Amino acid sequence: MTDAPAGTSEPTAESLEVIRKFAETYAQRTGTYFCSDPGVTAVVLKGLARHKDELGGALCPCRHYEDKEAEVSQAFWNCPCVPMRERKECHCMLFLTEDNPFRGDEQTISTETIHATAG
């Protein structure tokens, strides 16, 4: 772990790969697609992987939390969050339905693309 502020460290390669594979499988299983901008997908996946490393759970990185540890234990915002599981509503724009104007055509993303586009 580095001395970077919380939430700014790079996720481990192992966590990023676990999250990448999960996201691909989940998109295919639910008939959803990644954002047309691969940078959005990459940033979200890195955030999920970072939370997995730091908190032990893939907490949605696109929301503000007063207490991240408490949120992970409650599991409501752990990916896939309850709104996604119940209504296919993904605040992060990771899993997009056919009718979403930001939906791309991809249900896969390479590790190389994640590193190249997430900054």
Image (cartoon, grey):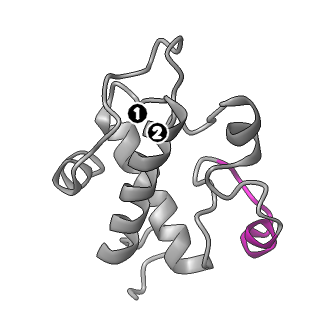
Report the residue at 37% width, 57% height from top.
21
Answer yes or no: do the residues labelled 2 and 1 have beta carbons within 8 Å?
Answer: yes
Q: Give the range drawn in magenta.
A: 63-73
- On residue 27, the disc is 2
Q: Is the residue marked by circle 2 packed among few (<14), some (14-19), or many (20+) residues within 10 Å?
A: many
Report the amino acid beneath label 1: Phe
> For the residue labelled by badge 2, is the local secondary structure a helix, a strand or a loop?
helix
Quadrant of the image occupied by residue 59: bottom right
The residue wearing badge 1 is 34
Report the amino acid beneath label 2: Ala
Quadrant of the snapshot with the N terminus: bottom left
Report the residue at 75% width, 59% height from top.
65
Quadrant of the image occupied by residue 13: bottom left
Q: Nearer the viewer, mark 2 or mark 1?
A: 2
Q: Is the residue marked by circle 1 packed among few (<14), some (14-19), or many (20+) residues within 10 Å?
A: many
Looking at the image, tell me whether mark 2 or mark 1 is earlier in sequence order.
Answer: 2
Report the residue at 71% width, 53% height from top.
64
